[in-house]
Image: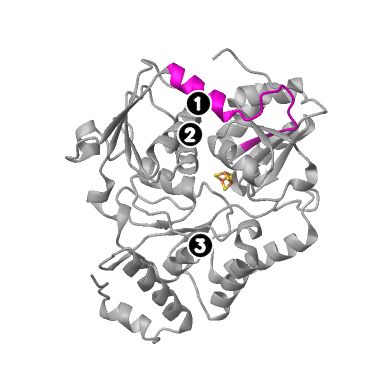
Amino acid sequence: MTLQLTPQQQNILDGNEGPARKLAMEILVKVGEGFGAQRLIPIQSVHLVLHAYKSAFDAGVEAAERIADMGGRFSVPTTIDPYGMDAEDWEGAKTPKEYAVMQKRLEAAVNRLGVIPVWTCTPYYGFNMPKFGENVAWSESSAVAFANTVLGARTNRQSAIVDICCGILGLAPEVGLHLAEERRGQVLVELHLNRPLQAWEYPALGFRLGQLLGNRIGVVAGMLGTPDTEELKALCAAAAASGSVALLHIAGITPEARTLEEAFGGNHPEETITFTKKDLLETREKMNTHKGKNVDIVALGCPHYTINEIITVQKLLNGRKISDNVALWIYANSAAIALAEKMGIREELEGLGITIRAETCMIISPIAEWGFKVMMTDSGKCVHYGPMECGTEMVFGSAEECVESAVCGHVWTKEA
Ligand code: F3S
């Protein structure tokens, strides 16, 4: 099956719109043909993952520079994942100088391409908000799962460089989750709790679902109450990290799943998975790779904390200082930090011993220099990547448990 280009697309491939657009088209045609696409379709926005020197390496930086040198410019709104180091205070964050130099080169290159420079994995909070049914080309796994699941937009998990090509052309291969028939549920996930989930249960459920589903599309039944976007963000991020979930349907809650029938779209579930409180408690136990009570750092904000989540931390602390032997770092984007500043919350939190890390995260900024051995977090995604990327043992808990642990100076858990 051959990919059919429109005359205008062929014109780009022939080089009549400059070398950058020609290169981008050559790459998209190869990718599209590799995945069996019949055509390239217009997209409304892009979200990039060529964002941190830690994962881009020299080759990624040089590729971005080369495309910018060739005259590449984004033709659709294009946002980008978190910065590869603390954007306000990389020296205070003990970032190696040579790393910082390369991060700034990457930043300069994507700026020349015309990126919207809000470095965050939660672009859907105000910067890049696709509508229901719109096609987009996003890369960040947690954002992809959120866009497909919660917004009902349509995107595959793009990869670095391919996402840049999509941004330059405003096109993506029409395969996978761009197609209605590829978005139908495959696995029924029954929750047997008879109550709304507690805060920690969203990432725990996502973590286990990712392991069980892989890249299959699950349809969750029995989720009671009305989860807020922060809870759904935590669920999507964990499922996308421990598996490769890019779309979940949650019956009665997400837009393509007003009913179970609609979510399955005529498919019969190939498997049914059930979840009880016991399953969630067992998952939580397995997420804790550290069994002791000591903790070095509490890391919150994976995905980036919203202003609401920062306010929750303020309320949980209620004026109490954190222990001298524990660090508590909150990761957030520039908009949430600006609001926290305007509301006086940043100053208050910093006075209580907390560090706000700007526009970056614990996973994609280098933190080895700090020598942390045990990290506690409320994020299922962070639990998954922490051992590999931070070299730490992990403790998982709710935001409340994380904050209390930082105050006590040791792991504190609540009766679940
Ligand atoms: Fe975002 Fe970093 Fe977590 S990019 S989802 S905070 S690993």
Amino acid type shown at disc 1: Thr
Mark found first going from the N terminus, 1 or 2: 2
Is residue 136 found inside the magenta-colored segment of the image?
no
Amino acid type shown at disc 2: Phe
Identify the mark at residue 283; answer none if there is no mark.
1
- Image coordinates for residue 182, horizontal then vertical, percent: 26, 50
Secondary structure at badge 3 equals loop
Looking at the image, do the residues carrying marks 1 and 3 touch, with CB atoms under 8 Å apart?
A: no
Mark found first going from the N terminus, 2 or 3: 3
Looking at the image, do the residues carrying marks 1 and 2 touch, with CB atoms under 8 Å apart?
A: yes
- Image coordinates for residue 292, horizontal then vertical, percent: 70, 23
Category of crowding for the residue at label 3, using alpha-carbon neighbours closer than 10 angstroms: few (below 14), some (14–19), many (at least 20): many
Q: Is residue 96 visible?
A: yes
Amino acid type shown at disc 3: Ala
Mark found first going from the N terminus, 1 or 3: 3
Is residue 278 found inside the magenta-colored segment of the image?
yes
- Which region of the structure is painted magenta? 277-300
- Residue at 62% x, 33% y is 310
Q: Nearer the viewer, mark 1 or mark 3?
A: 1
Q: Which residue is mark 3?
A: 160
